Image (spheres, rainbow, N blue to C red):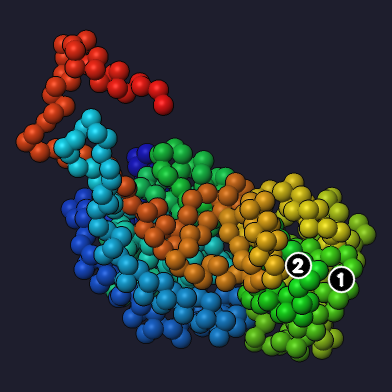
Amino acid sequence: MVAKVAKIADHNPQMVEMERIFKAQKAAYNAHPMPSAEERISTIKRMKNAIIRHEDALVEAVNQDFGCRCPTETRFVELVSLVEVIKYHVKNVRKWMKPERRSMPVNMRPAKAKIIRQPLGVVGIIVPWNYPYFLALDAAIAALTAGNRVMIKMSEFTPNAADAMQAMLAEIYPEDQVAVISGEADVGIAFTRLPFDHLIFTGSTNVGKHVMAAAAENLTPVTLELGGKSPVVIHESFPMKEAAERISWGKCINAGQTCVAPDYVMVHRSQQEAFTQAFTDVVSTWYPSMRDNDDFTSVVNERQLNRLKSYLQDAEEKGARIVAINPANEDFSSSGKMPMTMVFDTTEDMLIEQNEIFGPLLIVKAYDNLEQAVQYINDRPRPLALYYFDYNQERADYVMTHTHAGGGCINDTLSHVAVEDIPFGGIGPSGMGHYHGYEGFLTFSKSKGIVQKGKINPAKLLFPPWNRRIHKMVLKMAFKPD
């Protein structure tokens, strides 16, 4: 497979360089395949200090890529989150690395069984544009904690963030340990075809299918963090103002350009207008203006902006009701921003219903009873996240156990992503595999089972020739009915 990549790479210097780095990382891993806990802790601590030193440069770079990305939002959602992830891994890596004892069957004693966690080798990370730092480095921290080498392919839509990331990581890591790869889509395709020991991709479901197909050529294991239409269900007993605030938090961050952002809200039919008013009031209070307000993030580029506009146009032409929240009555026609917009009365033939929104648009649906809402969710592809609002624990448990999603929250949105001690990952069309915390360490490790025997070996009593009395006695005991 490497030869095939090299043939493609001959036409592109970036691909030649990418393959050279991959070979260097593979050689470095083979030369030192089991870093100690102290080495791993030192490795990820360096990243924490680098993030702190490069904070302003990282924030400004992604702001340039978006046209407007709220600096405080970037600091909290990306950089502070990464610092907390590093602290958690530093605290736990020694415990995770300890061999795990397992039980032995009676007929194999005396012997010991254990599992050791070995680094896989070279891990490839494909990063989307929406959270270029967090989604690159959260996976990288898990891979490095597990003792691997890491290659990171940044999105072509955030070139400034890619340069800032490359400058930061090159300052603290040799390229045979951590390397950042930039380039257009052709470089990304070649990246997926490298024979990594594990490949993690975050992005759309459609692209995820191509990544998985490319990885299959090398039998490379994949973790896919995709997306889908993450629902919110509000029980009629829940305070509507409180629900509107917590949903606005999850929807307005990064202007809705988040894989786990609420995609549609299901509210009891009797309270649809109450939610509409409460959501409008909250958004208007937080963002009294949007077009020139640095607190409200732009849509990342014209391509994505036109996609979102096409959803609205298509929905309106097919009978949907559009309610834009625009408290300052601003003109967005020449802006890279869109006002937060609610869409009602949608139907299955609308583009906004068929695709993940990934922007400042929110579908609002009415339901008549909780069972109906649950059935609606279950009739559709499994989402990456599901959010339910209800202080009644029995109903909350019912919704969470009778629906499938990658993860979710009860009485909140998005916050489960920031909890490093629980796994994050999709299911079905929203992805496969997990990372974050211990699950990330396991994803990027090989759990190797080992049996160890000493000088005494009672199992030799069972050696051939077969059908001796001892064999018959053991079989009789094994197959004794209860």
Q: Position of residue 358 (x, y in %)?
A: 68, 64
Front residue of 334 and 274: 274
Front residue of 448 and 306: 448
Amino acid on which the number 2 mark rests in the picture: Ile
Task: Decide if residue 119 is on the left or right side of residue 5.
Answer: left
Q: Residue at x 35, y 21 (%)?
A: 479
Task: Decide if residue 280 is on the left or right side of residue 109.
Answer: right
Q: Which mark is residue 271?
A: 1
Q: Is residue 183 visible?
A: no
Indicate the quadrant containing the N terminus: top left, top right, bottom left or bottom right. top left
Front residue of 127 and 75: 75
Among numbered discs 2 and 1, the one appearing first in the sequence: 2
Indicate the quadrant containing the C terminus: top left, top right, bottom left or bottom right. top left
Task: Decide if residue 432 is on the left or right side of residue 410.
Answer: left
Q: Is residue 157 visible?
A: yes
Mark 1 lies on a secondary structure that is helix
Q: Residue at x 62, y 81 (%)?
A: 68
Q: Which mark is residue 28?
A: none
Q: Position of residue 151 (x, y in %)?
A: 37, 59
Q: Residues within 10 Å of mark 1 (few under 14, many from 20)?
A: some
Tell whether label 1 touches label 2 (CB within 8 Å).
yes
Mark 2 lies on a secondary structure that is strand
Q: Residues within 10 Å of mark 2 (few under 14, many from 20)?
A: many
> Which quadrant would residue 461 be assigned to in this image?
top left
Relative to 409, residue 445 above or below: above
Q: Position of residue 69 (x, y in %)?
A: 60, 80
Q: Position of residue 53 (x, y in %)?
A: 37, 85
Name the residue that disc number 2 marks.
234
Amino acid on which the number 1 mark rests in the picture: Gln
